Image: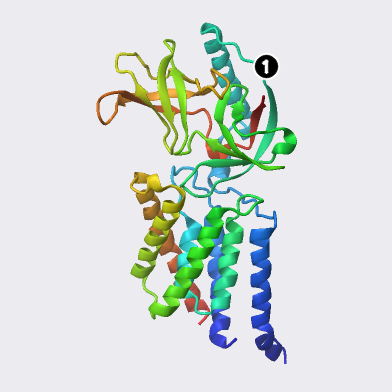
Amino acid sequence: MLYMFHTRYIKPVLIVICLSLGVGVFATPLFASKPNFLLGDIQALFSSVPQEQQQNLIKQNEDLKNVLYASQHEITFNQTQVISAKVFSLYPFNTKNRLFLDKGLGARISTGNAVLFSDRVLVGQVVTVRQNTSEVQSIFDGNLTIPVRMGSDEVNGLLRGGVNPRITLIDKTKKVQIGDLITSAAKDLPYGLTIGSVREVHEDSLGAFLEASIDTPYTINDLRTVLVTIL
Amino acid sequence: MNSLSRNELWRGVFIFVAILILSVASFTTLPIKPNIYLVAIVLLAFVMQEPLLYGVFLLGVIGWAKYTPASTMELLVLGIMGVVLFMLRKGLVRETHIVLMGGSVLILQLIFWGVFFAQGIFSVLFFMEFFYNILALLLLYGVWLWAKKIFS
């Protein structure tokens, strides 16, 4: 009897499941926040310092480096207000590199705002804002380009985003050293924000300019909280 | 629904759980991650016979892939590609073959990248993703064969 019930109604039940899943996926704001397990937990096992404390130390260190750099180069930061936002998900495909934040228009975030790892370290820029969420194009996104300056001589370059972001169009006559601080010089971002440091310098494929690879003080997958500037 | 589809349902649930586990496994050590959702859609399109069951699992995969409160073009494109692939497979292919699945992964990946990041198609990124996708496909296909043995 029970078997008869199952066989008779299973198709309509599947149709109902199909329809509700369709509505759930495309017409509701519901989504599953996925855990990121395995490697994070394994790393935590071998670390004597709690992960959060470790990240705070990195942030403080990077901020201090930037303060020193700014004082040496007479950079003064405009009074910008920042708010903290939680990263609730990452873009899951390789075609873009985006972060999704839990604050949007309601928190006065707007397109073009800088997104920071700490007070002075740039992560990316807000590209789409909704009422309660916003989408951030990170420096690891293949479509991002930002003018930058490097080192004590403030050498010009162009940051090209990607899985391995790099600084391109560096004048061959200028001196860029490994470990030089890379700072933002874009007109729509606060001047002098740290992007990372120079890891390696080499000639580009045409031999006309120099290119540099970057070390960033954070891993994009580990970001949980970021700061957003509000102008 | 006959016993064949009943077994198909259980196999589908089995493979769906494997997809969920694989999708939350952390790939932080790799700069490029496989597109598990695309691989899942291809595998399910080739191994499922019942259109309704495929519909349920396809929406399940897309629902799980959803990464923002709003629905996105990426998920819509994945859904459309899944439906078209299933219809083509039903109409043209009688047997499941891993080479056909691999070919479908490549074509779907080309379409996906063509729509969302066309300038990246000839990059190392694309080829590395394809390589990882094939590895993921082989892994999931192995799980499917195992499920077939259990629920036969």
Q: Quadrant of residue B54?
A: bottom right
Q: Residue at x 54, y 41 (%)?
A: A98
Q: Amino acid at mark 1?
A: Gln
A180 relative to A91 in the view: left or right: left
Q: Quadrant of residue A132?
A: top right
In this orientation, which residue lies closer to the viewer: B85 or A36? B85
In the rendered image, residue B20, in percent from the top left (x then y), is placed at: 56, 60
Q: Residue at x 51, y 23 (%)?
A: A186
Residue ID at (67%, 16%)? A79
Say whether residue A75 is left or right of residue B100: right
Q: Name the element at disc 1.
A: loop
Q: Chain of mark 1?
A: A
Residue A189: x, y in percent? 56, 24
Instruction: Please state the horizontal and vertical placement of residue A93, each as a whole percent of the image.
Output: 49, 49
* Residue name at image x 56 percent, y 25 percent: A188
Residue A171, above or below A92: above
Q: Residue A226: horizontal and vertical position, in percent?
A: 63, 32
Left of A152 or right of it: where is A55?
right
Residue identifier under label 1 = A79
Query: Could you tell me if residue B143 is visible in this image?
Result: no
Q: Nearer the viewer, residue A4 or A73?
A: A73
Q: Could you tell whether B50 is left or right of A177 in the image? A: right
